[in-house]
Amino acid sequence: MTFDEEDTSVARKARWGKLPTAAPVDSDDGQDLLERGWEATKEEFERNLDRVKEAIDELSDEEIMRDEDLARHAFHKVGAYDGPTIFLYTEHGTGIRHRGQLDRLLEESEELWIVPADVHF
């Protein structure tokens, strides 16, 4: 299956609605997708970082070690290089984890495209 097949219920508009198949990052659609992806990454990081801080403040070392309240899971997500809490990736599949990394990519690249994708880990 390719992303541009029209007669399917798992691709194109049936899957993505009004999202473009791909867009130059400097276009309106591209800027919208980029901002949505970055905001989602940032929100997930902040949500999990709050969980980590709460666990450190409220749980004993033993409770954290036992993964009480999924504390260790939150620690893992804060340190993730890829996976469901990282929403933007480079062309090489490297997760974009911080704004400096994203800004450097945007500055150093002459022509960038953004492609909505559904990745399962």
Image (tube, rainbow, N blue to C red):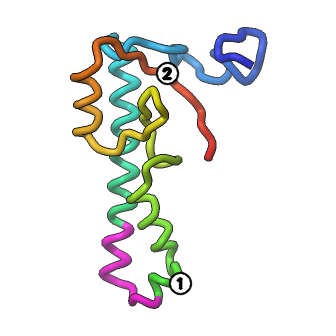
Up the image or down, 87 lies above or below 74; here it is: above
Between the residue at mark 1 and the residue at mark 2, the CA separation in whole angstroms equals 39 Å
Residue at 36%, 27% in the rendered image: 34
Q: Is residue 77 above or below residue 52?
A: above
What's the amino acid at mark 1?
A: Arg
Is 68 positioned to the left or the right of 88 in the image?
right
- Which segment did they paint magenta? 51-62
Going by the numbered disc 2, the residue's amino acid type is Val
Query: Residue 121, position in %: x, y?
Result: 61, 47
Q: Secondary structure at mark 1?
A: loop
Residue count near mark 1 (Cα–Cα under 10 Å), binned few <14, some 14–19, many ≥20: few
Where in the figure is residue 6, as x and y percent of width and height?
Answer: 72, 9
Q: Is residue 3 left or right of residue 29?
A: right
Residue 28 lies, with reference to residue 119, above or below; the image says above
Percent of width and height locating residue 107 = 22, 23
Is tag 1's residue or tag 2's residue first in the polypeptide sequence? Answer: 1
Q: Which mark is residue 115?
A: 2
**Residue bearing mark 1:** 66
Quarter where residue 27 is shown: top left
Circle 2 Cα neighbour tier, 10 Å, few/some/many (<14 / 14–19 / ≥20): some
Q: Is residue 52 on the magenta stretch?
A: yes
- The front one of 66 and 108 is 108
Residue 47 spot, x, y in % from top left: 37, 57
Q: Which mark is residue 16?
A: none
